[in-house]
Amino acid sequence: MAWVSDAQLAAAVSEAGGLGIIGSGAAPADWVKEQIRIVRQLTDRPFGVNVMLLSPNVDEVMRVIIAEKVPVITTGAGNPGKYVPALKEAGTKVIPVVSSVALAKRLVRTGVDALIAEGMESGGHVGELTTMALVPQVAEAVDIPVIAAGGIYDGRGLAAALCLGAAGVQMGTRFMCATECTIHPRIKEMIIKAKDRDTVVTGRLTGHPVRVLRNKLARQFEELEERCAPPEEMEKLGVGRLRAAMQDGDTEYGSVMAGQVSALVRRVQPAREIILDVVQGAAEILRAAGRRVSAS
């Protein structure tokens, strides 16, 4: 959610009862500090920052998070182990994203507080396992809370995740069409118009596959993969493309990272409405399931 989830969206989600996350991506530490302070001006609820451990600014960003005593940090693209002691000393909960059971077990040993088991249905960087398969395996393998991510749109997804052993869910794509999300309107429109097969995974040969909405850039990546181009050539093609999409509205040559649930997103609505829809929908489903079990 880099270039997508800034202070405005994170604060709106937290204020509505969720846990809003600032997506720091490769942003400099000063930007992250500014976003943290804006969130605190907008809400007194807990919030978090997501840190990509491959960012060239990761050490500086971690120092800001520790100094600011951010309540929660989520991490991706690496092992946050070396930062865990200082983060926990600052009172920060550490929740890494995992895409396999092996990684989940390894990160538990570093002392993290929970895990996000993210299936390949999600937008952005993905693994190989689906949410349906991954979540119960991770939940069985560890003794800390597991949060399900990937392919979750409404109360049906939350109810399913809870039944699979998750303690909650992480959602991204639907919140791209939240009123408070500041991405370019053309990208929101593209998501709303998407059909069930309009996402594709590119960049597998780089070792960092990414799910995006199909466009001319995605086709360029597919052409490079067909001729087995060097990973460096693919990485060069991707530089700056996420910002071009989310901030400049480039729907053709921007990297429109979005998940398979794009086809379910039909309108722009406030974050509070999204959260109420998800929570109330799940409660109704689980109550109905309970009645059916009782009746049988």
Image (cartoon, grey):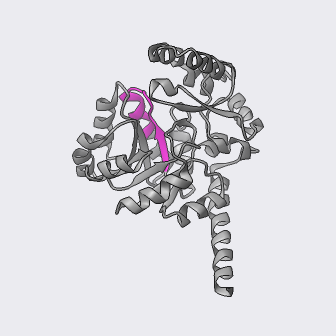
Taking depth in this image into account, of 231 and 274 the one nearest to the observer is 231
Q: Is residue 229 left or right of residue 51?
A: right
Q: Is residue 21 magenta?
A: yes
Q: How many marks?
A: 0
Residue 84 image point, x, y percent: 26, 46
Residue 213 image point, x, y percent: 66, 31
Taking depth in this image into account, of 94 and 148 the one nearest to the observer is 148
In the rendered image of this protein, does residue 108 appear above or below residue 62? below
User: For residue 25, which quarter of the picture?
Assistant: top left
Magenta residue span:
20-36
Q: Report if residue 4 is visible in the image.
A: yes
Residue at (68% x, 80% y) in the render: 292
In the rendered image of this protein, does residue 165 appear above or below residue 223? below
> Which quadrant: the C terminus?
bottom right
Q: Is residue 55 left or right of residue 195?
A: left
Q: Is residue 42 left or right of residue 251?
A: left
Q: Is residue 252 magenta?
A: no
